[in-house]
Image: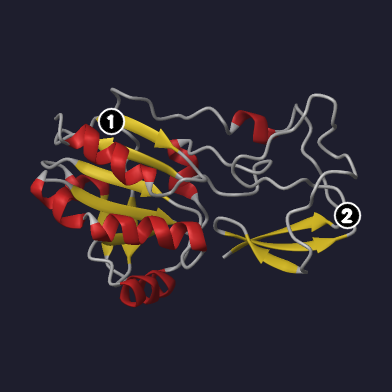
Amino acid sequence: MASLTLPKRSIPSLLPNQTLSPRHSLFSHNLPIISNSSQSQFYGLKVSYSSSFSIPSSSSSVKGSIFAKVNKGTAPPSFTLKDQDGKNVSLSNFKGKPTVVYFYPADESPGCTKQACAFRDSYEKFKKAGAQVVGISGDDPSSHKAFAKKFRLPYTLLSDEGNKVRKDWGVPSDLFGTLPGRETYVLDKNGVVQLIYNNQFQPEKHIDETLKLLQSL
């Protein structure tokens, strides 16, 4: 699972519905911190605390990462990755049927588990729509295999170790570029992107949005 080191009294809570008043600085000492414990789970990120933290400047490479390279109406870059059984799987294998490709931060994290199980629970609806579901994260195949077995996931999980595909597709990151983004793409039977949906903090909404689009294809 990804990890991040944060200062004890610098970073405000970045949980959903957190609102900052214009009168408060992002680093005000009066704002709440993520957790009082030494470690916590944050939507796919293991968070620990230390006395130092470096914030990217506006000119850093993180700024450029928020602009997706894949757009609606285009065909995304091809890839070949290993699935949870260690077999090579290419994007071209899914051509001919609508395909849902969802990038998520990490196996076993609360938000990612909720999202994975929501796809599982709606899997028959996706099959009825003639669509395939593919999940991608930076975890290795053995992690995917354990994750799929534990939660009885009936679809393919691909291992993007090094996050090359994530970068090629331009999936934006969250939390100052340290938290891998949660983004879903719906490709039609010709491999052309028809929907891009990004929502880090409401994992289950990815299922609602993708089904809504698939039912209109």
Give the residue at x 19% y 50%. 132
Q: Earlier in the sequence, mark 2 or mark 1?
A: 2
* Residue type highlighted by circle 1: Val
Disc 2 designates what residue? 52
Q: Tell me the quarter of the image containing the C terminus.
A: top left
Dots 2, 1 in contact, CB < 8 A = no
Quarter assignment of residue 44: bottom right
C-alpha span from label 2 to label 1: 41 Å
Residue 185 left/right relative to 96: right
Q: Nearer the viewer, residue 125 or 135?
A: 125
SS at badge 1: strand
In the rendered image, residue 216, in percent from the top left (x then y), is placed at 15, 29
Q: Nearer the viewer, residue 161 or 175?
A: 175
Q: Mark 1, residues whose alpha carbon is within 10 Å: few (<14), some, or many (≥20)? A: many
Give the residue at x 46% y 65%. 107
SS at badge 2: loop
In the rendered image, residue 78, in percent from the top left (x then y), is placed at 31, 42
* Residue type highlighted by circle 2: Ser
Whether residue 191 appears in this view of the structure is no
- Count the marks: how many? 2
Residue 6 left/right relative to 87: right
Q: Is residue 97 above or below residue 9?
A: above
Give the residue at x 73% y 54%. 34
Disc 1 designates what residue? 193
Whether residue 125 appears in this view of the structure is yes
**Scheme of colours in the image:** secondary structure
